[in-house]
């Protein structure tokens, strides 16, 4: 008996979930936008303290990883299993490098006394405390999404390896890919908002 | 061959990656030119262009069907209402 697969339904379900993610981050962006319009000078000073280098490198890393995930789907459809495995592994490496960068970025901030509740922020101007509070919440929440995305990519990698994901049955890879692209999409807005308002 | 329609070649994907990287360079470059409040809008327009590329090519939005396109645009519409009304409120306090 042929197996019935509802690919359209699975994809629609994933998109519906992604909309909730868009509204989740959208709410945080509104919060940022309102405070930015109230205290532009403090937010500009905050953005200058972030260090553009980390932001640019992480943007490039995420864009490349998104390309690799898209390439893995093309590879699966061309029955190039090894290419798909290599692309997914590459995307996972990109995710790991992103998190390592974040570790050093946050580590440096914490070292110079910029972290939620630090004396430097509590004694300084309140709007700058707001900026860095939002910075930690938004990039932290995004970082959690990167970790979840890496788990999903890892599952896809194993399923491709076990030949459970094929050109005819690609919904899992497609949906994991969609999640990863959304994480990239959100970073596309986080990067200019936090690092480029100078 | 029903799947073939939503599969992009490596070349297309590579071109999109190249464009995204160039746009990242442009947005970083533009931030060094001080145009006042226009800077924010330039940044947002470039970010939206990048997001559209990711949605249409990497996320295969077109082939996902009308339902996805319409529901996605509705989400953006409601997000715009949320942002618009909040700023409306904030501006007239």
Image (cartoon, rainbow, N blue to C red):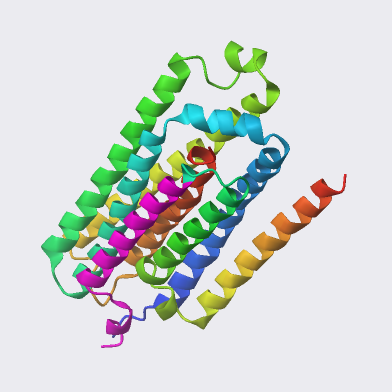
In this rendered view, identify the residue nearer to me: B7 or A147: B7
Residues drawn in magenta: B1-30
Left or right of residue B74, residue A99 in this image: left
Examine the structure image and report whether residue B19 is included in the region drawn in magenta.
yes
Considering only vertical position in the picture, is A169 above or below A20?
below
- Percent x, y of residue A144: 45, 40
- Percent x, y of residue A97: 28, 38
In this rendered view, identify the residue nearer to me: A18 or A59: A59
Q: Quadrant of the C terminus of chain B?
A: top right
Considering only vertical position in the picture, is A127 above or below A61?
above
Residue at far bottom of view: B1
Magenta region, main secondary structure: helix
Q: Residue at x 62, y 45 (%)?
A: A28
Left or right of residue B30, residue B86 in this image: right
- Percent x, y of residue A32: 64, 41
Q: Residue at x 17, y 57 (%)?
A: A85
Q: Quadrant of residue A36?
A: top right
Q: Quadrant of the N terminus of chain B?
A: bottom left
């Amino acid at each position: 008996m042929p197996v019935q697969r509802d690919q359209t339904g699975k994809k629609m379900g994933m998109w519906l979930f992604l909309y909730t993610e868009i509204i989740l981050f959208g709410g945080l962006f509104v919060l940022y936008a309102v405070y930015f319009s109230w205290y532009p000078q403090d937010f500009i000073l905050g953005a200058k303290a972030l260090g553009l280098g980390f932001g640019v490198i992480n943007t490039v890393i995420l864009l490349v990883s998104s390309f690799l995930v898209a390439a893995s789907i093309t590879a699966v459809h061309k029955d190039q299993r090894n290419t798909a495995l290599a692309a997914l592994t590459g995307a996972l490496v990109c995710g790991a490098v992103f998190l390592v960068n974040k570790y050093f970025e946050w580590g440096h901030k914490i070292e110079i006394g910029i972290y939620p509740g630090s004396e430097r922020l509590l004694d300084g101007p309140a709007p700058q405390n707001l900026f860095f509070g939002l910075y930690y919440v938004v990039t932290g929440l995004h970082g959690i999404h990167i970790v979840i995305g890496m788990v999903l990519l890892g599952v896809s990698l194993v399923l491709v390896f076990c030949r459970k994901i094929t050109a005819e049955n690609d919904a899992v890879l497609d949906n994991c890919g969609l999640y990863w692209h959304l994480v990239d999409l959100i970073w596309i807005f986080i990067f200019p908002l936090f690092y480029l308002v100078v | 061959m029903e799947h073939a329609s939503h599969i992009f070649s490596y070349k297309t994907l590579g071109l999109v990656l190249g464009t995204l990287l160039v746009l990242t360079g442009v947005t970083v470059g533009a931030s060094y030119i001080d145009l006042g409040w226009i800077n924010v809008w330039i940044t947002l327009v470039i970010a939206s262009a990048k997001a559209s590329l990711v949605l249409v090519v990497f996320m295969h939005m077109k082939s996902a069907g009308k339902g996805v396109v319409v529901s996605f645009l509705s989400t953006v519409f409601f997000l715009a209402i949320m942002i618009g009304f909040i700023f409306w409120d904030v501006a007239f306090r």
